[in-house]
Structure formats: structure tokens, C-alpha cells
Amino acid sequence: MDNYQIINKLKGGLIVSCQALEDEPLYSSFIMSKMALAAAEGGAVGIRANSVVDIAEIMKTTTLPIIGLIKKDYDDSEVYITPTEDEVDALVLVGADIIAMDATNRPRPNGETLDSFFKKIKDKYPNKLFMADCSTYEEGVHARELGFDIVSTTLAGYTAETKGRTLPDFDMLKKLVNTLDIPVIAEGGIWEPAQLKKAFDLGCHCAVVGSAITRPREITKHFIAAIKEN
């Protein structure tokens, strides 16, 4: 698929995030590939996946577009979603259809700014689709100005500036949809079908759901919390 076809394929649909961290019971590229297959059979239009090994394995089980990222911690930065050129290169090499990266205003490793980093990346890969994971409306607008192809609400509530924010952040989503002329993806804190419906009512291009579908430990905690409330 070309870039137009990829964007069109995602429109109006559900992207399932198939990720498991090292401390989680389902941490396994094989298991994530089966999660992706189950999501595809359930009607998902795309997969969001972390790491080269997971993406490579998922590509064996489904032909759905893949939003790829690499989570990596660096001592000198809070940015951990595709933070440097090395991660971008690896995602291009493995064949991720869309590359997601932190597009917050926080400094990247080695003190690099998003502006200088993304210019370098876009010059290197001018025909690749890039998705901006943002935490605020202003960051989303700035990402569009820099040349990102897609903006998402992924990091709302996950930065120092937005900590404690109620999720899903429908206000941020609405403002971005009403302002930007590129696809806006709703992501973060969607646990109920009613929340998903509201995101689409607000005009999002598509939506990402992860924990509520693919992380049984977190799903269990979600239900346990409801019991404790009683």
C-alpha cells in the first residue's frame, strides 16, 4: 500500500495496540503476533506495536498496516518513544508502515530538540509516514507545522505537564480535530465502547485501544478497582 492507501485504510476504524513490557506475563513476540492476529480477525484496521522483533513477528500473521515504535530509555531524557535516529532507522528497516514518536516539547537524548530531530529524520525519509504522539493541543499543532503526517493524543496525562489529566482527553481531541488538516488519532485511556463512540463523534480519523484489549493484567486491575469502590 502507498501512503494514501494506508491512511485511508485506517479511517473510521480501530487500531489495536499489541504491546507488552518486559515485566509483564505476556512479554513475547510470539504472543504479540497472536494478539495481532486476534485483533485482525476481530475487525481491527491496524496494529500499533513496539520493538523490531515484535513488528517482524506480527508481520508474519497479518497484513494490516503497522504503526511501529521503539520504547527505549536514555539517562538524559524523559522521551522514550522512538527517541533517536537509531530507533527510526530500525523501524524503517523492519518495514513499519507508520513510525510513531514522542512529539512533546521535552528535550530528546543529547539535548536535541524535536524541531532539529524531526527535520533530520524527514529529510532522511521524506516518503515515510510519521505519527506525532502528543500530550497537549499546542504540541499537536506544532507537530503539524513540523510536517508530521498524523497527530495523536497518546501522551496526554503521561508527562509532568499533563499528569492527573482525565482520560480520554476529549477536549484535546476536539480542538485538534477542529484545527488540523491532517488525520487526528484518539489514543489513551479508552476503556469503554461509549468512550470510543464519543471519540468518533468528535471527528477523529481513527482510534487506538491497547490496555483494554491486550493487557489482561491491567484489565484485571481495572475490574478489581471497581470492586474496591463498592
Image (spheres, rainbow, N blue to C red):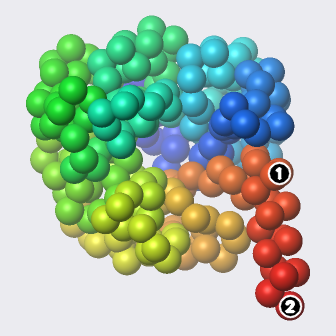
What residue is disc 2 on?
230
Residue drawn at 81 percent across, 52 percent down: 217
Residue 70 lies left or right of residue 40; in this view the side is left
| Residue 18, visible in the rendered structure | yes
Q: Nearer the viewer, residue 209 or 8?
A: 209
Tell me how far mark 2 sits from mark 1, CA to CA. 22 Å
Q: Which quarter of the picture shows residue 34?
A: top right
Q: Which quarter of the picture shows residue 203?
A: bottom left
Residue drawn at 42 percent across, 36 percent down: 80
What residue is disc 1 on?
216
- Numbered disc 1: secondary structure: helix
Height in image: 138 above or below 73? below
Q: Position of residue 129 (x, y in %)?
A: 34, 30
Q: What amino acid does circle 2 point to?
A: Asn
Q: Position of residue 89 (x, y in %)?
A: 37, 13
Q: What amino acid does circle 1 point to?
A: Pro
Question: Quick one: label 2, few (<14), some, or many (20+) residues within 10 Å?
Answer: few
Q: Nearer the viewer, mark 2 or mark 1?
A: 2
Q: Position of residue 136 (x, y in %)?
A: 30, 63
| Residue 4, visible in the rendered structure | no
